[in-house]
Image: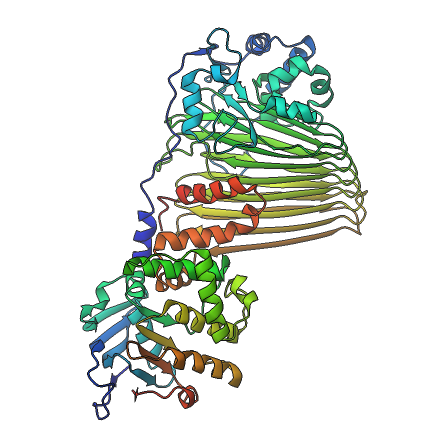
Amino acid sequence: MAESNRKALEKITGAEYPYGFVTDVESETIPRGLNEDVVRLISSKKSEPEWLLQWRLKAYRHWLTMKEPRWANLRYPEIDYQGAFYYSAPKKKEGLKSLDEIDPEIRRTYEKLGIPLAEQGRLAGVAVDAVFDSVSVATTYKEKLAEAGVIFCSFSEAVQKHPDLVRKWLGSVVPYTDNFYATLNSAVFSDGSFCYIPKGVRCPMELSTYFRINAMETGQFERTLIVAEEGSYVSYLEGCSAPMRDKNQLHAAVVELVALDHATIKYSTVQNWYPGDKDGKGGIFNFVTKRGRCKGVHSRITWTQVETGSAITWKYPSCILQGDHSTGEFYSVAVANHWQQADTGTKMIHIGKNTRSTIISKGISAGHGQNTYRGGVMMLASAENARNYSQCDSLLLGDQCGAHTFPYLDVQNPTAQVEHEASTSKIGEDQLFYCRQRGLSTEDAVNMIVNGFCKRVFKELPMEFAVESQKLLGVSLEGSVG
Amino acid sequence: MMARSHSPGTEGPKGAQVMLEIRNLHANAGDKAVLRGVHLSVKEGEVHAIMGPNGSGKSTLAHVLAGRDGFTVTKGEVLYRGKDLLALSPEERAREGIFLAFQYPVEIPGVGNTYFLKNALNAIRKHRGQPELDAVEFLALVREKARMVKIDDTLLNRPVNEGFSGGEKKRNEILQMAVLQPALAVLDETDSGLDIDALRVVADGINDLRGPDRAMIVVTHYQRLLNYVIPDRVT
């Protein structure tokens, strides 16, 4: 890349990760390391029923027999699972009852992050469940949702108040034996969100969970479960951030979605975990299992993700298209800047007849970033007339970064149709010069070109998040070396 | 390219200032010398045609004036309204009023034509200390200009040049020029690949923009555009 563009790209620099501050709050943390006692301790802290403890223990014992997967296109040092803390909760001030009584320090943290815990302000009309380290600290709009029959609360609360629902669906999409990280999560998960939309209900507002890791050397293992009954609709947003620390921190979440007949779940993620500094030091290791089951006929699950953070991203939000005529969609923008590495994509498993899936993946690599798309499309023998369309585009900024695409296709039904398109382009000298010749600065030109590249995905996000994402993308690419 | 402006037999508009002065310009592409001593003087209000066969350096001159990377000026100078043009970045030159109509207009997927042009115009207006236009004001302006160059409204909403035909791309360049109202427009082979109707539209667009404060350099290797756009000088 020519010198003046290189300089200009370098100049889009400076801005540090803006969410890297630490909240000074007294925490209750259990001893370092992982063993059966730790699993029991977490369960007892949450006053869980015996069946859940047993489920955790089964998961833990199974985990001991498993090996960390190394097939991803990722390089990172050995993770010391005994060196981390598995539970950290801000100490409760006595007698907190309403949202107004949240520890002011924590409230300020969310305000700084732009996530108001009051039921007004910028995200008015979006119900928020705020998870701080291992516990949920607040859920807004609960009453209003309850009127519609929607249950939206922390996972811990759901275990206490709706044990039958949790027991029925927990592990029904991602069993505790699923994979190394999901199994670890099943043993030690601390909190997360639970959401249940009853039959025929269109959830009256966007639901949102905001995850914040604060404590040092603490893993975050949240678990989200969303069940959409027949004919219901819900749109769910997830955001996250963490302080800047020079040690890597582990995040291994599990998200399970279940859509019954004619139900629709839209799940959007704006992932902005601390990516590490520009020399690759620190940052979150993000090993996440997200899967939805389109269990009913004509059900639909849409995953939309904007992945800009984390040092390591290992994540494949997938759909099991079980019900006939069900639809799975995956829209993704993944950014790997500086020394970030992302191995992300999806799996669409077509079981039912006339099932449809769409995959649109946009990978952006800058600096020394490595971005891998890994996607599987499986058409089982039963998937009569199933169809898939995949499009994977990669954009390179500079000449030190990389883009990789690994599509896996497995078609066992002759009536099934699978289409795959892929492209890799470098942000063009021609495009930059054209924009600059019209009076735009290089920064504006890069932003415009990158946002244009991602437009198809941003269109799928709810309005506020689309705007956020555009800005976030601008910030994330700051410091990208041309 | 070796070029020397014809000695001024027919003067341009009376009392007009020199807008662009190129003196003994040498430029390399890589280590190949492409421009070898170009002299050119363009006054306000003039339309100046530069003709010559392929590979003679016409397009290089256009790109060097616009500030494209990849060319090294080894000798000579370019004064634009008395300022050292070569010291400015491409965007500064654009904001100072230099417009290049590209021979091969570039596609920018996902970026709306109108959005792009509005941002460009506002960058230029900001530089001039003028208030930026809001969406409504801009839309009125761009619709009016689009009618002038016979560009369909649907093209305004499509991504910049993406999937445009050759003729549509060239007309889009003229539309951008009409909206941005440059002081010095350099048209690089704008007539190539056009059928007769498109050529007429492009020529009308250029003629509409002629004015006492504006100068144009028309780079071409055909005579035919010059049948419609009568230059003040030919080099």
> Residue A71's x, y, as percent?
56, 36
**Does residue B174 sit above or below A223 in this rendering?**
below
Q: Is residue A328 left or right of residue A69?
A: right
Residue for point 39% across, 20% down: A23
**Does residue B209 sit above or below A97 in this rendering?**
below
> Residue A14's x, y, as percent?
31, 41
> Residue A280's x, y, as percent?
38, 35
Q: Is residue B90 left or right of residue A337?
A: left
Quadrant, the N terminus of chain B: bottom left
Residue A481 makes an appearance in the image: yes
Q: Residue furthest bottom?
A: B9
Q: Of A412 and A423, which appears nearest the observer? A: A423
Q: Is residue A169 left or right of residue A79?
A: right
Residue B104 makes an appearance in the image: no
Residue B185: quarter of image: bottom left
**Does residue A437 sit above or below A225 in this rendering?**
below
> Residue B15's x, y, as percent?
19, 83
